[in-house]
Image (tube, rainbow, N blue to C red):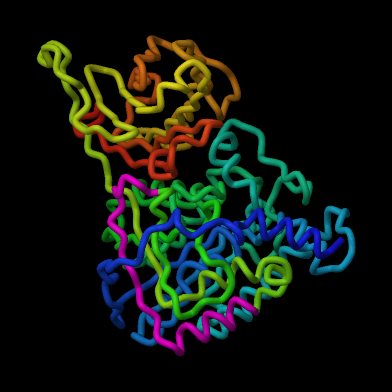
Amino acid sequence: MKKLILLSIAILYGVFLPAFAWAQPGEFPSIEPFSNKDRVLILAPHPDDENIGCGGVIQRALKSGAKVKIMYLTNGDHNEFAFIVYEKRLVVRNPAFVAMGKVREEEAGKAMKILGVAESDLIFLGYPDYGTKNMFFYSWEGSAPFRDRLTRQSYVPYKEAPSYGAPYKSEHILADLERVLIAYKPTKIFVSHPADVNGDHWAYYCFLQIALQDLKKQFAEPKLYVYFVHAPGWPLPRHYHPQLELEPSAKHFPDALINWSSFKLTEDEIDKKYKAMLAYKSQTCVSAFYLLSFVRQNEIFGDYPLILLKKQKSALLKGKDVFNDDKRISYAVVDDYFWVRVRKPQELRSRLFFRFYFFGYNDDVPYSKMPNICVRTKKDKVVVEELNLKKNLDPQGTSAQLKGELFILKVPLKLLGDPDFLLTCVMTDKTFLPLDAVGFRKVKILDSPSRRK
């Protein structure tokens, strides 16, 4: 039975997927060197992500005399299958999951000690593993706290957390993050990727983007490095291959919008990263073949470029295309509407459902009071939902149009809260769109209402 379970995990994590879907090794520019003036902040969605994405970076920064702090969004207390294998018994009682969150916290302390990070430089926020995505969607001011399915908690249960006892509400995550940013004033931040298929990973990225907007006048803008972890069948081959390099996936990022950079590890750094990974015994007991596949010659970083949109006037376009590129997903602002165009295969035109997410930021409105909008579409039919209020809204002129392989959505800027800045993505149950298209994008509207005041 155990062998069958482990085989199933291997298939799930892509051990037997063919390697031809991946980019061939190439040269990427190196990240900026560290100095003794750097204050490095590593944002890890779960204990072990800091080592997966940045184990070598952490060591090099410390060697250079830089300060390093690591802040964990969750304690990783939702990995029930790993806990069953680790405990060698069925874990069903709710307190047991919180206890396993403590185990992962202790493992992080041991792993980071191997890399040279002091326990006092580890911050565990204690928010719900596998729950911060839903918190970002639904649990802002005015809504009920998120309730975790396994722990049955709706508040931070870890006494050492800076907001112990705080309800699972998104404004508390944002406040915790902003307190650390203000006090520490990092010069370099490493954070998980907006196209990562794990919701906690892209949620941490989105929380950071909001926090940086809130604090943009309070300290110098830090250099941002974005690390990638979860995608089906990545990286390949599985298991421990320290002689190989990590490469971005040609399958998941075909449009090459991301300017990737690389960080080369020394043999000693690879060895310590390997030992630190093994310190996560509760995770390596079931997925060492996956986790150790990140222990390689390098670590890679890359984010989508900021999209700058200047408002166009329909009266002046005179039949011209409102979109200035030919990507799978394109954006435009025309008059008082935000436009999204999706390019897709024609064979899917009659049976495809989209969910468009819009999280707007207005300099004059607290983010927790901004609308969280989801537009669900089927052909030319649209439903507009305010996620935080959990209710459908008047579409207010929102429209969808299907033309062959092109799907075009128009949403009034007023419905989005007249944003200066947007985090937006499109999701679908079909798989024709790669991660390169559906990851959260940062959009800045150059002549938004608040800037005209």
Q: Does the rendering let one see residue 178?
A: no
Q: Residue at x 30, y 49 (%)?
A: 256
Seen from the viewer's position, the closer of residues 421 and 277 is 277
Q: Residue at x 49, y 60 (%)?
A: 19
Indicate whether 435 appears above or below 77: above
Q: Does the rendering let one see residue 175?
A: yes
Indicate whether 438 appears above or below 125: above
Q: Residue at x 39, y 64 (%)?
A: 247
Residue 443 in percent (x, y) is at 30, 38
Q: Quadrant of the N terminus?
A: bottom right
Residue range (magenta): 253-278
Q: Quadrant of the C terminus?
A: top left
Q: Is residue 218 magenta?
A: no
In this rendering, position of residue 130 left or right of residue 6: left
Q: Residue at x 28, y 66 (%)?
A: 28
Residue 228 in percent (x, y) is at 45, 58
Residue 312 in percent (x, y) is at 17, 22
- The quarter holding residue 342 reads top left
